Amino acid sequence: MAKNLIEYEKSAEAKQWISDESAEQEKRYQQIVQDMDDLSDERDVWVEKFFHRIQTRGFNVHYDNRRQIPDDELPTRPDRPFKVVF
């Protein structure tokens, strides 16, 4: 991180505000993580439906040209938990 070139002091009020905002953001973040974890079973179903769709129906490569994906081209599920980036 860059060195702070301007020396200044934060007021007690500013420090309290930063602390309060950080706590609120952490609380919101934890709620989002919990919501994403609660959706994990449903997300697995979505992924399976998507894989089935691109194997049977295919997807558009160009205009109206479709390509079906064979089993060996599908990604394998990693051993780690599914992580949603937001």
Image (cartoon, rainbow, N blue to C red):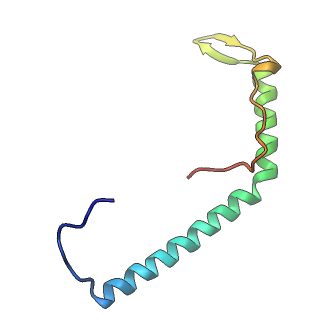
Q: How many numbered marks have been drawn onto this rendered protein structure? A: 0
* Residue 56 seen in the current view: no
Which residue is depicted at the point 51% across and 71% down? Answer: 25
Choose between 85 and 60: the one closer to the eye.
85
Question: Which quadrant of the rendered structure holds the N terminus?
Answer: bottom left
State which quadrant residue 21 falls in. bottom left
72 left or right, relative to 32: right
* Residue 42 seen in the current view: yes
Vertical side of 32 occupied by 42: above or below: above
Residue 46 x %, y %: 77, 40
Choose between 17 and 42: the one closer to the eye.
17
Residue 19 x %, y %: 43, 81
Choose between 85 and 8: the one closer to the eye.
8
Find the residue positioned furthest to the top. 65
Find the residue positioned furthest to the left. 6
Which residue is depicted at the point 69% across and 62% down? Answer: 35
Residue 69 x %, y %: 75, 18
Which residue is depicted at the point 75% across and 50% down? Answer: 81
Residue 26 x %, y %: 55, 72
Which residue is depicted at the point 58% across and 66% down? Answer: 29
69 left or right, relative to 22: right
Vertical side of 83 occupied by 22: above or below: below
